[in-house]
Amino acid sequence: NSMKVANNAFATKLSVPEQVIKEIVNLANIARKNGLIVLEQQPIADPFLKKAIMYCVDGHEAEFIEEVLNKEVSLTVERHDIGRQVFSGMGDSAPAFGMIGTLVGLVQMLSTMGDPATIGPAMAVALLTTLYGALIANIVMIPIADKLSLRSREEERNRRLIIEGVLGILRGLNPRVMEEFLETFLPPKERTTGVQK
């Protein structure tokens, strides 16, 4: 399961927030002109947005939609955090296991002190486990944990953006106003509306 989580951190492509905003604004324009029911026929790439739109089309109340989607976001963040903690824990433990290997190697080396020719190679092998522990921690486990944390925050932001956008569509918010509001989820330099630069 942890390997699946790691694979998702690097292989799965998240929706670009600017594209999600454009798609939501487009859906808001369509809903404003033709009603919510027409949104059912629209091609929607993001599965979370699709689910949220289907709740609207099915006639659910805004409070219900907000509660269900927020619960899904919270549980997703929780699952991601568990995966991050696994890799973070392995990153914290790897150097300790390396040191244990070094101690075992040193004990072995000391047991062969009678032959000076074996001391150098035995010492090298003993210290190598410390190196492996540090490499596994700092080149594999900790970067995966950091990447999982970053991906989780990005996905949470995208989903919160979608929730706000869908609630805006449901409430009949003006698409231009909605676009400005949704762009507050973006860094100021990436916004296209309002005074931000």
Image: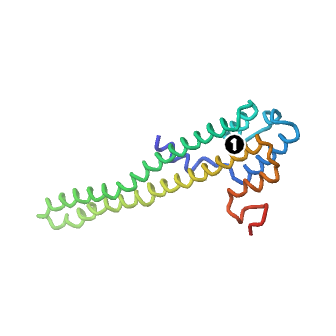
What residue sits right under mark 1 in the picture? Answer: 46
Question: Where is residue 63 drawn, in percent x and y?
Answer: 67, 38
Question: Where is residue 131 drawn, in percent x and y?
Answer: 35, 62
Position of 121 relative to 159 (above/below): below
The quadrant holding residue 48 is top right
Residue 115 or 83: which is nearer the viewer?
83
Q: In terms of secondary structure, where does tag 1 sit?
A: loop
Residue 162 or 169: which is nearer the viewer?
169
Looking at the image, which residue is at 82% across and 49% down?
A: 174
Looking at the image, which residue is at 81% across and 46% down?
A: 26
Question: Where is residue 28 drawn, in percent x and y?
Answer: 81, 44
* Label tally: 1
Residue 27 or 15: which is nearer the viewer?
27
Task: Give amino acid for label 1.
Answer: Asp
Find the residue positioned furthest to the left: 114
Counting other residues with Cα less than 10 Å from the Cα at mark 1, is it few (<14), some (14-19), or many (20 or more)?
A: some
Position of 160 relative to 120 (above/below): above
Looking at the image, which residue is at 81% across and 32% down?
A: 37
Position of 109 relative to 55 (above/below): below
Relative horizontal placement of residue 167, taking residue 74 as reference (left or right): right
Question: Where is residue 134 drawn, in percent x and y?
Answer: 37, 61
Relative horizontal placement of residue 123, taking residue 160 as reference (left or right): left
Residue 129 or 33: which is nearer the viewer?
33
Looking at the image, which residue is at 49% across and 54% down?
A: 144
Find the residue positioned furthest to the top: 58
The quadrant holding residue 197 is bottom right
Find the residue positioned furthest to the right: 33
- The colouring scheme, among rainbow, by chain, secondary structure or one colour, is rainbow
Relative horizontal placement of residue 101, taking residue 62 as reference (left or right): left
